[in-house]
Image: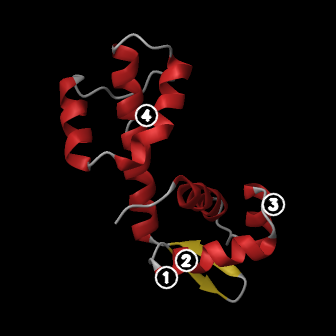
Amino acid sequence: MRYSHRELQYLLVIKRYNDSGKPARLTAIAKDVKVAPASAFEELNHLAEKGLVTKDKNEIWITDEGKQYIMKAIRAHRVIESFLVKLGMSKDEACEYSKQFDLMVPEEIIEKLYIFLGKPSNCPHGEEIP
C-alpha cells in the first residue's frame, strides 16, 4: 500500500509524541501539522482505517505497522538522496528532489540503489540510513 507525504507527516508527528511516552492529541497534531482540528480529525480517521494509528478516546498512538512504514519511507528518502549526491547534486538539492518521488519508488529498487552505493550507513546530511 502506498502512502502520501501528508500521511507521513502526521505519522512523524504522532511518533514524536509517542517516543516521549505520551499519546498524541488531536489539537497538538493539528497545531504541529498546521491544519484545522477538523482536518486533522479526518486524516487521523484515515490513518486508523489503514492500521497505522490507534485512537482511544483522545489518545493517538502509532502502531507497529505505522512505525515500519516510517522506517521504509526514511530509508527510501535517504538512499535516493545519497544516490543524487553521488550524481553530483548538492545535499540540499538532492533532498528536495528526493521528496518529490521517494515514496513512489518500490522497495526492491531502493535496495538495489543501496547496494549500488556500497551500503552507506549515513545519508549526505549525516543521518543514519535504517
Residue 117, above or below 16: above
Q: Which of pointers 4 and 3 lies earlier in the amino acid sequence?
A: 3
Which amino acid type is shown beneath numbered disc 4?
A: Glu
Quadrant of the rendered image containing residue 98:
top left
* CA distance separating discs 4 and 1: 30 Å
Residue at 65%, 58% (x, y): give it. 13
Type of amino acid at the residue the image marks with label 1: Glu
Characterize the local packing of mark 1: few (<14), some (14-19) or many (20 or more) Cα atoms within 10 angstroms. few
Q: Which residue is mark 2?
A: 46
Cβ atoms at labels 1 and 2 below 8 Å apart? yes
Amino acid at dot 3: Lys
Instruction: Report the front residue among 124 and 89.
Output: 89
Question: Which marked residue is nearer to the observer: mark 2 or mark 4?
Answer: 2
Which of marks 3 and 2 precedes in the sequence?
Answer: 3
Q: Secondary structure at mark 3?
A: helix
Residue 37 place in picture, x, y as percent: 79, 72
Residue matched to label 1: 49
Q: Which residue is mark 3?
A: 31
- The picture places residue 6, in percent across and down from the top left corner, at 58, 57
Badge 2 density bin: few <14, some 14–19, many ≥20, Cα 10 Å: some
